[in-house]
Image (cartoon, helix red, strand yellow):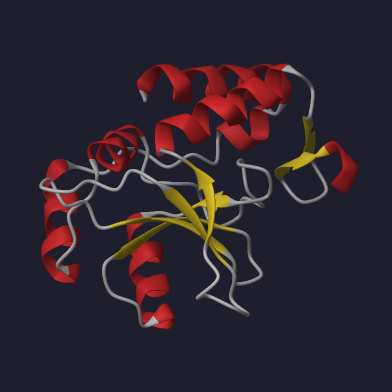
Amino acid sequence: MDEKLAEIKAWLADNAPPLLQLLNPPATPAEIAAFEARHKLVLSPEARAMYLLHNGEDEKSGGIFGCYRWLRLNAVTEEIKLMGSEGIFPLFYNGGGDLYYVKSHNPAAPDRTLYEWWHEVPEDAAVIADSLEGFLAEFAMRLREGRYAYDPRILAVAKWEEM
C-alpha cells in the first residue's frame, strides 16, 4: 500500500502539486479504533494502512482518484449515516452520491473487493477492483500512461476524455 500510494503522490508532486497539499495528515491508531467501535466495523488491513498514511483528502479537493475524493474518517461516518447501510466502508466519493467502498473486513472470510455504489441503484454494486491495493496499482499505471490529467478548475485528477 505504501509503495502504490507513494507512486501516486510522486505523480501528484510532478503534475498536480496543489492536490498533494490537500491530503490530510494520518489518522492515529486511536482514531481508527474509535471509528471501528462506533460503527461496529473492522477496517481491512489495506484500508487501515491507507488511513495510517493519510486521513483522506481535504473537502476542497475535487478528487485525486479520477474525480473521486478519498474520504476522511469523519466524512465516512456521514456517508454511512446517509446510506443507512451496515457493514460497508465507503472510501471514495465523487460528489454526486456515488461511492467506491469495501465491505467490513471479516478475518474468517475476507472480501478484499472494491465495489461501486451508484446512488440511483445501490443494489447494482459493480466490482471496481479485486482489492484496494489492486485499485491503487491500476490507478498509478493509468497515471503513468497519461490517461489522467490534473484539472485545476476543479482541483481534481480527471480522465482525459472528461476534461
Query: Is the residue 134 above or below the residue 110 in the image?
Result: above
Q: Which is nearer the eye, 47 or 135?
A: 135
Q: Is residue 163 visible?
A: no
The residue lying at 47 percent from left, 31 percent from top is 134
The image shows residue 70, relative to residue 77, as above or below, that is above
Left or right of 160, for residue 21: left
Residue occupying image coordinates x 63% and y 80%: 120
* Whether residue 102 is visible: yes
Above or below: residue 113 compared with residue 86:
above
Q: Is residue 94 left or right of residue 85?
A: right
Q: Quadrant of the C terminus?
A: top right
Q: Residue 43, image x and y in percent?
A: 23, 49
Quarter of the image where the N terminus is located: top left
- Taking the spot 46% from the left edge, 21% from the top edge, the residue there is 4
**Residue pictured at 71% horizontal, 44% vertical:** 156
Q: Can you tell which quarter of the image residue 150 is in?
A: top right
Name the spot of residue 89 as percent of width and height, x first: 34, 60
